[in-house]
Each structure stands twice: as C-alpha cells, then as structure tokens.
Amino acid sequence: MFSVRAFIAVDTEENGTVGFDFHHKITVEKSIDQLTQTAAFVVPKKLVFQGKDVSIGQSSIFKRGNAVRIYLGYYPECPKVFEGFISDIKGDLNTTIFCEDLMWKLKQEEIQFSYKGVQLSQLIKDTIPSGFEYEVNADTTIGHIRSKSKVAFTQLLETLRKDYSVHSFIREGVLHLGQRYPDTVRTNVDGSGVDRVFQFAFHRNVLREGNTLVYKREDDVDIKLTLRSTNYREDSGVEVEVGDVGGSNRTLYFFDQTAKELKEIGEREIKKIRFTGYRGKFKTFALPKVEVGDLARLVDAENPKQIGAYIIKSVETSSGTSGAFQTIELDLKVDEN
C-alpha cells in the first residue's frame, strides 16, 4: 500500500512561510480549455499556528493573495503539483482554501487597448503588466480588437481564445500564448529537449474506477469543423465547414484567410481529430505526476495493437481518505514514429 505524502506551504505577511503536512482533502484541476488552473485544500477549522487562527477571523494568518505551493505524492517522492495564490477562504465544519494559479495576479491588472490589426507578439508586449514573463510560441495576426474601457488583462486573453483560437496558460511561472499544445512546452519543461511521455498499463496503473475510455475506429468518428476568418473590417468575414454533417462540432478562428485557405486548414485539422484510438478519461495513481500537454502512452497486454500515445488534455489531482490519484483526460493521438 502506498503511503500518501502531502505538504502545503503558504507565504504569509506576518509569519513568513507556514508549512504543514496534514489535510482533509486536496484537489487540483488543470485543463487546456480553462484559462485559470485551480486548487483547493481542506483543513481543520480551528487550525492554530503560534497562537493565531490560521484561516478564519479578522486576525487569521492566511489571507487572500498569499502565495501557495502544494506538494503531493507517495513517500518518499512528493513533487509540486500546484503553485498559485489564495483566491478565497470559506469555513463551515472545516475550512476550504481556494487557490488560482498566476492568472489570479493577472486578473488584478487592468489594461486598455485598441488595434485595427496587430501581431500577437506585439499585442502582448504592449499590454502585459510589468514583471510578468511570457512566451509567444506561435505568432499570428490579430484583427480588429479593442476594449471600450479598462478591463482585466485576462479579459484580453479570453477574447484571444474565443475569437482567434489563441490559447493561453501558465507553466512554471511563465505565460504561454499561441498553439493549443506547443511542442516547446512539452519538450522543454524539464530542460531535456525530449517529449515527456508517461506509460500507463491497463490492469496495472489504469484503474477500473473512474475509467471512461472508449476505443473507436476513425470511421466511427463523426466530426465537423467550422472555420471562421475575420479581416480588418468588423462586419465582414468568411466561414467554411468541413467534415461530417451532424458530427460533433468544433469552431476555429482565424484572421485574413480566404475560403480556399480555410478549407485546406480544415482538411488538415480534421485528419488530426479523426483517429483510431482511445477517447475519454482514466484514473491512475498520483505518481508519476503528469501535466497538461504531456503524452500518455496507453498499453494493454491483452490488446497489443491498441498501444498509442495521446496528448493530455486535463488532469485532476486529488487526495483524501482513499488515497492520492490523478484523473487524466485524453485529447489527440500522437504519432511517435
């Protein structure tokens, strides 16, 4: 039986770093489809440190905005699974501390902008608050974009995601913008320059509980892509659909593309989405720790032809009375050859 090991460190204003290795529950949620990655941990309501209440009351040690680091694994390995800031504190029978990653800080920063057309790299350079590191992994032209008044910097990121398919996420304190799954993040997060691939085997560390995986042939997958492109004029644009009528729909946004170019892009993209392989989620142990964008290779001794590697779309890490686990959601299949 694995021995769960957890440690939580909170940087407080008056008492420095307060660390403790006990908790009722920990949850960490990360997804490429969510701008903000979140965490929450539950501690006893009457938790006291050096004679002061830790989490409840006007004089409590923990406060909104305190930096937080959460470590979780099995003895003796206890890697960091979350880094961010306290966003809220709620108390009932116990106290729940809610946390958000660096996006919480960016939500506090207000900006105003107006462009008829601009490169993504220039837009971010002009608007990102000072002191924040960023990396544009795929530069692109952004069309007409403006705010009527001051808005949170994260509102710009949401607009870029919604209208231009520009994804944003935090990894190791750096804001990454551009592709949904940039190779530079997957291969360089540990400095090795090679893909982070983690193997999971059915009947071993792919657990039955929480397993929603379904193996489908590409011929059985109905997908429709809607591709939209805008230009410098707000009231004009082009829309193209490719794929299967009645299939599950995904919409992609572009700038200054013709109908022919959109169709070519759509036909390339739909080949990535329509594949023979697994779809869904599976539950596994807390180690090895994985991140969104890593590769999960699934192997099955009873079905060796179904071996394949998939980009990880989301990870929910949890710890409680039943142990510590990860629930991993798969996205696109990747050719490892």
Image: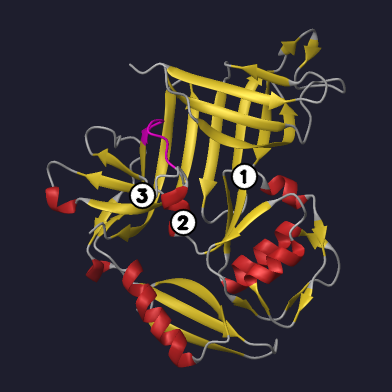
Of mark 1 and mark 3, the one earlier in the sequence is: 1
Amino acid type indicated by mark 3: Val
Spatial CA span between label 3 and label 2: 10 Å
Residue 302 placement: quadrant = top left
Q: Is residue 169 magenta?
A: no
> 87 left or right of 287?
right
- What residue is pinned by disc 3? 194
Amino acid type indicated by mark 2: Thr
Tell which of 35 and 215 is nearer to you.
Answer: 35
Spatial CA span between label 2 and label 1: 15 Å
Q: Residue at x 31, y 69 (%)?
A: 274
Amino acid type indicated by mark 1: Gly
Give the quadrant of the C terminus.
bottom left
- What residue is pinned by disc 2? 184
**Crowd band around label 1 with a 10 angstrom C-alpha radius: few (<14), some (14–19), many (20+):** some
**Crowd band around label 3 with a 10 angstrom C-alpha radius: few (<14), some (14–19), many (20+):** few
Q: Position of residue 142 (x, y in %)?
A: 64, 77
Residue 333 placement: quadrant = bottom left
Q: Position of residue 200 (x, y in %)?
A: 28, 40
Q: Secondary structure at mark 3?
A: loop
Query: Looking at the image, which residue sits at the far front?
Result: 192
Q: Residue at x 36, y 50 (%)?
A: 195
Residues rendered magenta in the picture: 284-290
Tell which of 164 and 216 is nearer to you.
Answer: 164
> 96 left or right of 2?
right
> 234 left or right of 230?
right
